[in-house]
Image: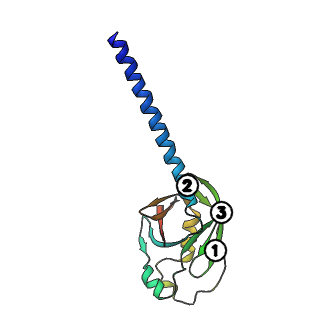
Amino acid sequence: MKIKSLFFSTIAAIVILLVSCSSFCNKGSNDKKADFSNLQEKTWQLIKVERPDKNIELDRNKMNTMHQENMFTLIFRNNNISGKGFPNNYTGQITNQNGEKISFSLIASTRMALLTDTENLLLQEDEYFQLLQKTTSWEIKDNNLILYTVDNANGKSKLIYFSK
């Protein structure tokens, strides 16, 4: 009789544990979707690009003093993205967003001439647009938005943004 009681107590404890884990795990996945909605209507400023071959850090303080605070930005609005490269405005669509997975359509941009020496730029605008188009997933870490990209030729990269 004691063995039956111990057996049923153990089964009951396992069921309670599984139900608790199930509701906790589901809560986590719902939070991720809610987190994506919190990205909307904010101006995300690129602060770093991590690539297998090089890392690029953008000095936002210096950019602000040079009136370049709107350069290399990203804004989510409904199913669209927009922002500013350097110097062009761009737009695109979110073609897939499911949990932490995300992808964008081809980026369309204006074609203004850049009146500065592009050889000294840390990040070229076309390179930035190409990275955006290769985005596969995202996460929020330490209050930063991180977009992960995959490029068969160059490996995985990260675009790291912050928002005020």
Instruction: Kindly identify the amino acid type of the residue bearing the numbered disc 3.
Output: Asn
Residue 91, percent across and down? Answer: 65, 71
Which structural element holds mark 3?
loop
**Gap between marks 2 and 1 measured at Cα:** 26 Å
Which mark lies nearer to you, 3 or 2? 2
Which mark lies nearer to you, 2 or 1? 2
Which callout, 2 or 1, points at the residue further toward the start of the chain?
2
Which callout, 3 or 2, points at the residue further toward the start of the chain?
2
Which mark lies nearer to you, 3 or 1? 3
- Determine which residue is flagged by label 3: 78
Residue 141, percent across and down? Answer: 43, 60
In this view, the residue in front, 9 or 130, is 9
Identify the residue at image location x=45%, y=37%: 21
Which structural element holds mark 1?
strand
Considering every residue shown, the one lying at the far bottom of the view is: 115
Q: Mark 3: give few (<14), some (14-19) or many (20+) Cα within 10 Å.
A: few
Instruction: Kindly identify the amino acid type of the residue bearing the numbered disc 2.
Output: Ala
Residue 89, percent across and down? Answer: 63, 78
**Gap between marks 3 and 1 measured at Cα:** 16 Å
- Determine which residue is flagged by label 2: 34
* Label ID, residue 90: 1
In this view, the residue in front, 96 or 123, is 96
Residue 160 as seen in the image, left or right of residue 136: left
Instruction: Kindly identify the amino acid type of the residue bearing the numbered disc 1.
Output: Tyr
The image quadrant of residue 43 is: bottom right
Residue 159, percent across and down? Answer: 48, 66
Considering every residue shown, the one lying at the far top of the view is: 1
In this view, the residue in front, 88 or 155, is 88
Identify the residue at image location x=43%, y=84%: 62
Q: Mark 2: give few (<14), some (14-19) or many (20+) Cα within 10 Å.
A: few
Which callout, 3 or 1, points at the residue further toward the start of the chain?
3
Identify the residue at image location x=58%, y=86%: 114
